[in-house]
Image: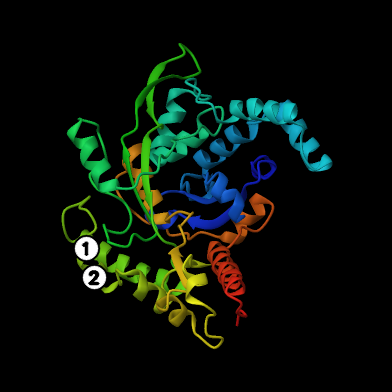
Amino acid sequence: MRRLFAVMGMEPVGYYDLSTAGVPVHATAFRPIREESLERNPFRVFTSLLRLELIDDLDLRRRAADILARRQIFTERCLALIDRAESAGGLSPVEADELVDEALHTFRWHGEATVDIETYQELRAAHPLIADVVCFKGPHVNHLTPRVLDIDSAQRAMHYRGIRAKDSIEGPPRRRCPILLRQTSFLALNEPIRFVGPGATDGRHTARFGEIEQRGCALTRKGRKLYDVLLSHARSQQSTGKAGHVVGESPFDDFPDDWATLRREGLAYFRYSASTAATDLGQAPLAASVESLIEGGWLDARPLTYEDFLPVSAAGIFRSNLGAMEETSYEAGGSQRVFEAALGRAVNDEIELYESAQAVSLAQALSDLGLRYR
């Protein structure tokens, strides 16, 4: 999977341990990391790896591993084209189109299970997502995620039109200055499937659902630490109230909600550029600080979009759509080292990517103003 996405210019970014929120997977997001690529196609694929060691029943764990070991999720031609791309440094346009066609077989939904109904029910009892991963021919796409500018309006509109949407929006509350990521979804379809075995039993399965997102500003390590502390306080309040209640806004009052404060306190990342008025203002002061250049009109600062995910939010979306509403944490924590061993490489640190993007933009902006980056 990593090699396929690499051919498409997408790299693994971030490590997400969803087991702490009751979902037995860890994950990364494959996406472009270069600025020009993100501007052209800000597309990302959240990709999870099942953690079989979290299945308590040892016999069921062994059977699940055997089922997964027997399947081949890529066509032979797809693998051959990946090999060619790696050895030749790319593909011809015809080969690239063929690779896409072949890769579609991997992600296509299959209505036929690879197990009998009894095995499916045992795996589903362990966790619905385990059954979703193990019992079918391949790693089907659970959902696509359109991006909206006002997710609260989208949520209200879904309820107004009778769409079975989540009760609440995942992520930070509504703010004047949006941060990180907010997500909601309309609930998974209950689709007909067919099991193997005597009689080829018919059944139903929920896996594919719709999701909507609104992206805000990327936070620095300092900003993310503050957000996580406030989120923990909000979740503590939620656990003492009605289950499924939207995260309250009160704990987040301590998170600044204006761009100038977020920038001055080093809580969020920005992209800098010389302002269009800089020429009319004349030479910028050589010893001026970044803040004074902004205040004087020489420098513009725009929030850097958060291109990644939030593990608690992702787990909440999974639970609400796969029928696992109880939020319990698995005792065994995640392991980035184990995940990267399976991946075959280290994941990119998303914070380092934002730090680099901000630094590069500031250096270029100061150079455009005839100043030296310090």
The three-letter code of the residue at mark 1 reads Glu
Q: SS of the residue at dot 2?
A: helix
In the image, which disc is placed on residue 249?
A: 1
Q: Is residue 63 visible?
A: yes
Q: Is residue 22 visible?
A: no
Residue 355 in the image: above or below residue 161: below
Q: Are marks 2 and 1 in contact (CB under 8 Å)?
A: yes
The quadrant holding residue 167 is top left
Q: Which residue is mark 2?
A: 253
Query: Which of the colour schemes (rainbow, by chain, secondary structure, one colour) is used?
Result: rainbow
Q: Residue at x 48, y 79 (%)?
A: 290
Would you say 53 lies left or right of 80 here? Answer: left
The three-letter code of the residue at mark 2 reads Asp
- Alpha-carbon neighbours of circle 2 within 10 Å: few (<14), some, or many (≥20)? few
Residue 111 in the image: above or below residue 171: above
Q: Disc 2 versus disc 1: distance between alpha carbons? A: 7 Å
Q: Residue at x 60, y 25 (%)?
A: 105
The percent position of residue 35, horizontal first and vertical second, equals 59, 55
The percent position of residue 157, horizontal first and vertical second, equals 22, 37
